[in-house]
Amino acid sequence: MTSKALALIQLRSRSIMKYLKHNLASTAIRLLIALAVLLTFALTRVSVKAQCPTTVLASDLRAPTKIILSQNGNLLVAEQGNGPNTGRISILDPNSRERRTLLDGLPSAINNLGGFPAPSGPSGLAMRGRTLFIVIGVGDAALLGPLPGTEVPNPNPSSPILSSVLEVHFSANAEKTASGFTLTEADQIALQSGAELVLDNGKGDKLTIKLLADFPNVVPAPRPDLPDNTVSSNPFGVAVNNNLLYVVDASLNRIWTVELSTGATAILTTFAPLTNPFPLGPPAIDAVPDSIHLFGGQFLVTLLTGFPFPPDEAQVRIVDPRTGDNQPFISGLTSAIDVLPVKTLEGGDEFLTLEFSTNQLAQAPGRLQRFTSPGGPPAVIANCLITPTSMALDPKTGRLFVTEIFTGRIIEVIVAGV
C-alpha cells in the first residue's frame, strides 16, 4: 500500500472517531457505524501470525451482507449495492465459482447517517421451498438532523419500499439456468401499491415477487430541542418458522414478526440496552441485534453492541418465539454478527460464531470461532476475516462460506467434524 493511501486511511479513521465522539447520542445507525469504523483500515491490520485457513471463493460483489445455502446446493447472496437501487441477489455455484444474477435493481441507497457514505439495501435472506424472503434495509430513508445525534425523515428516498420484506418465488429450473431478472423503479412503485409482479428475463424464465411487509422507515423520538426527531429502522436479518417470519431490526433493537398469509407485523421483543464498561461513551449502549437462526424450536440472535463496541461484551441470546423472553446463551464475544448451530458427526450440537472485529477501536480483523458447548471455551478457526457479516455451512462437505461486506468477497473455510 502506498504512503499516500495509508495517509488517507489514517485521516479517514481519525475523522470517523471524531464523528463518533461527538454523536454518542445517535442511535439510528448502530450497525452502519460498526461496519464503517473498520472499513478504512482493516485491510492493513491483518497480522502475519493470524490463523487464516481460508480461500477466496468469489470477489467483486456489491457489498455482500448475507448468505444462505439453497436446496439445490447453490449459495444465495444478498448484496447491499453500490448506489440507488443497485441491490442484488446473486446465485453462486460453490464448485465452479460461477456467479449469476437472480434479481437486480432491488431497493438500496447510500446511507450517510454514519458520517460518511455506506451502502444499505438487501440485508437478510431466508428460504422455504422455492420461496425466498428478502429483507431490505433502511437505505436513505432518514437523514442527519440539524443537531448532533438527531435524524429526520428523507422526503425523497431512493425507493418507496425501503425497510421492508419482499417475497420472491422462482422455480428450481430458474435457479439452474436463469440469467437474471431486474426490478425497475416502476416495479417498486407497483409493489408498494400491493401488486404481485411476474418478471420475465426474456429467455423463458419467470419470477414472481410481492411486498410482504413494509416496516416504518422511522419512528418518533422527540427531544426537548427537536420535537420532530426520529430514529430510523434497519432490518438486518430474517428467519422463518411455521407461519411467521422473524426479522431482527439492528437500529430499533427489536424482533418483528410478520404473518406469511397477511403480511401483518408485530413486535415480538425489544432488547434492553447493555451496560457500557468503558469510561468512553454513554453509560448504556445499544444491543444491536443483527442475525437470527432457528435452534431447537427457539431462536439464536447475535448482539453486536453499539459504540464503543467493548470487547467481550457482545453475546448470542436465545429467544422464545412465543413470548419473546430472551436469555444469554453464548457470552464473551466482541462485535458478534452471526451464529450457526451445527450438528457434529455424532449428532451433538455445536455453534459457530462470527465476530465483525475482535476490537474495533484497535483496528482488529474479524474472527470465526467454534463452541462445543455454549459455555465454551471456544476454539479459534480463523481470525483474519475482513468485515465479515454472515456465514452459511454446507453440512455435506463441511465447507463454510463467509461474506465480507467491504472487500466484496466470499471466503471459504473448511470446518472439520460437521
Image (cartoon, rainbow, N blue to C red):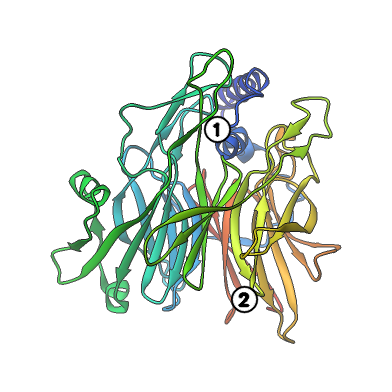
The image shows residue 142, relative to residue 199, as above or below, that is: above
Query: Residue at the location (73% across, 47% down)?
Result: 48
**Kind of residue at badge 2:** Gly
Secondary structure under badge 2?
loop
Q: Earlier in the sequence, mark 1 or mark 2?
A: 1
* Left or right position of 263 against 290: left
Query: Residue at the location (19% across, 63% down)?
Result: 198
Instruction: Report crowding for label 2: few under 14, some 14 to 19, many 20 or more residues within 10 A (C-alpha).
Output: some
Q: Which mark is residue 238?
A: none
* Left or right position of 359 against 120: right
Q: Quadrant of residue 44?
A: top right
**Kind of residue at badge 1:** Ala
Q: CA distance from mark 1 to mark 2?
A: 37 Å
In front: 107, or 378?
Answer: 107
- Tell me, yes or no, whether the two marked residues, 1 and 2, touch with CB atoms within 8 Å: no
Instruction: Report crowding for label 1: few under 14, some 14 to 19, many 20 or more residues within 10 A (C-alpha).
Output: many
**Where does the image place residue 209, in percent across and percent down from the top left?**
28, 61
**Where does the image place residue 294, in percent across and percent down from the top left?**
60, 69
**Where does the image place residue 376, in percent across and percent down from the top left?**
85, 64
The residue pinned by badge 2 equals 398
The residue pinned by badge 1 equals 28
Query: Residue at the location (64% across, 24% down)?
Result: 25
Quarter in which the N terminus is drawn: top right
In front: 372, or 209?
Answer: 209
Quarter in which the C terminus is drawn: bottom right
What is the residue that sits farthest to the bottom in this orientation?
Answer: 346
